[in-house]
Amino acid sequence: MNFDVLIIGAKACGFTGALLLVAACAHPIATRHQLALDELLQFTSPTMCELSAPHRHLLDGMIAGDANAGFSPGLILAPKGMRRLFGPIEVRRHDSYWTVEASVEGTLFGIPLVAIIHSLPEGGDAGDVTYVFGAPIATVESALRARGFPARAGQEVELGSPDLQVPVMALLVDPKSRGRTLLSCYYR
């Protein structure tokens, strides 16, 4: 876009400030936060918090090793253009579980996604996944509900009929960081 022509034309009409602002807004500068991860991080069933195959592949790839021998950072298994949106994988051992975390610089459901944390209990039981959003809980709840997730702000919601373990979705304010929201899917 040729801003010189716009400025000259705008001055002739007396609209310099407004037109320049509109022209600048019409072609925003791309930032990494503007890149959507929705295609990679799809849910096959939002009502059950079921992950698509590429989504599961990403989470599984973040982990190398096993609970008995110990976990270590794996790889970000994402399309080449999306890999740069993920920070280094950090693995931490806790008393009875491990966490595998990667920072994220993109959006999910139109909301900034800050991190993905995968928690794995020792013994090989089903783990959980938490998505850290850089937005207030009401904003995240609205976006989730518009996409069929049964999430409720500040609550744990049991999903479907339980087998041996009850599937749960929780939408909570991040206690570590003001203005962030946690969406977690796990079994109880």
Image: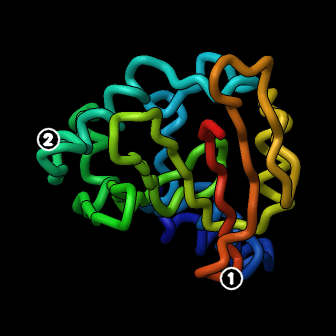
Q: Secondary structure at mark 2?
A: strand
Q: Specify the amino acid type for callout 2.
A: Gly
Quadrant of the rendered image containing residue 82: top left
Labelled pair 2, 1 in contact (Cβ < 8 Å): no
Relative depth, front residue between 101 and 85: 101
**Residue 24, image x and y in percent?**
59, 67
Quadrant of the rendered image containing residue 50: top right
**Residue behind mark 2:** 65
Q: Specify the amino acid type for callout 1.
A: Arg
Residue occupying image coordinates x 35% and y 37%: 59
**Residue 49, image x and y in percent?**
65, 29
Q: Is residue 103 left or right of residue 93?
A: right
Rendered-image quadrant of the C terminus:
top right
Relative depth, front residue between 50 and 37: 50
Of pointers 2 and 1, the one earlier in the residue sequence: 2
Q: Quick check: 79 above or below 170?
A: above
- Residue 30 makes an appearance in the image: no
What is the CA distance from the residue labelled 2 to the residue labelled 1?
34 Å
**Residue 140, image x and y in percent?**
76, 54
Front tag of 2 and 1: 2
Q: Which mark is residue 178?
A: 1
Q: Quick check: 2 above or below 49?
A: below
Q: Is residue 141 left or right of residue 169?
A: right
Q: Quick check: 73 above or below 92?
A: above
Residue occupying image coordinates x 46% and y 33%: 126
Relative depth, front residue between 131 and 14: 131
